[in-house]
Image (tube, grey):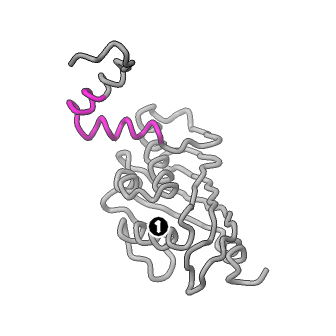
Amino acid sequence: MRVPAHRSFPITALLSFFLILALGTSARVQAADLDLIAAGSLAVDKSLPVSQRDAQILAARRYASFWNTGDAEFARQALDPDFVDRTPPAGRLPGLPGVLAASTAFRSAVPDLRCEVTQMIVAGDRVVSHLRFSGHFTGTLMGRQGQGQPIQFIATDIYRVKNGRIVENWHLEDNLSLLQQAGLVSQ
């Protein structure tokens, strides 16, 4: 392929393109991993093997990126096929289908939902992620139409990670703050 002299075309971009074509999906996934959410603060058990530590952090970052973007592929990469939510709200479907439905429902209420990992702790086979969610209530929640109210609340997740995938999750969200900010309960 001959590039005209008047155009600048970075050779690294061309090489990256051909590498991704040659290697297929795994290269795309690894390239996408570079854009995952990183924790503001990270504390790691230094006795963990590096490969285990990195796999656990990657699973947690993929899951946080799912909540940040709503991209179901991140959830599929992060969660084990036998994933169990140990603290589901009443009526939530089990496993990945429940997680995807929860994200879709919440994004219908807060379409610009963002998730930030303020801190992450990695020890043993666990990852604790402290999350901050923000956005604007412009959709519908509990039968009420939002008026653009700013939303900001926290959540803490405890993941058990096995073979680089989250197999269990215990979580607690500050739903009272969310409902108060949305005007669904009085302060």
Dominant secondary structure of the residues highlighted in magenta in the image: helix
Residue type at mark 1 is: Ser
Examine the structure image and report whether residue 23 is included in the region drawn in magenta.
yes
x and y percent of residue 168 in the render? Answer: 43, 60
Other-residue count near label 1 (Cα within 10 Å), few / some / many at <14 / 14–19 / ≥20:
some
In the image, residue 20 sits, relative to residue 77, either above or below, namely above
Residue at the extreme top: 5
Which residue is pictured at 58% across the width and 52% down the height?
129
On the rendered image, what quadrant is the C terminus found in?
bottom right
Total number of numbered discs in the rendering: 1
Q: Locate residue 123: give its quadrant.
A: top right
Residue at the extreme bottom: 143
Which residue is pictured at 42% across the width and 67% down the height?
99
In the image, residue 175 sits, relative to residue 68, either above or below, namely below
Span shown in magenta: 17-35
Examine the structure image and report whether residue 170 is included in the region drawn in magenta.
no
Q: Locate residue 171: give its quadrant.
A: bottom right
The answer to whether 113 appears left or right of 57 in the picture is: right
On the rendered image, what quadrant is the N terminus found in?
top left
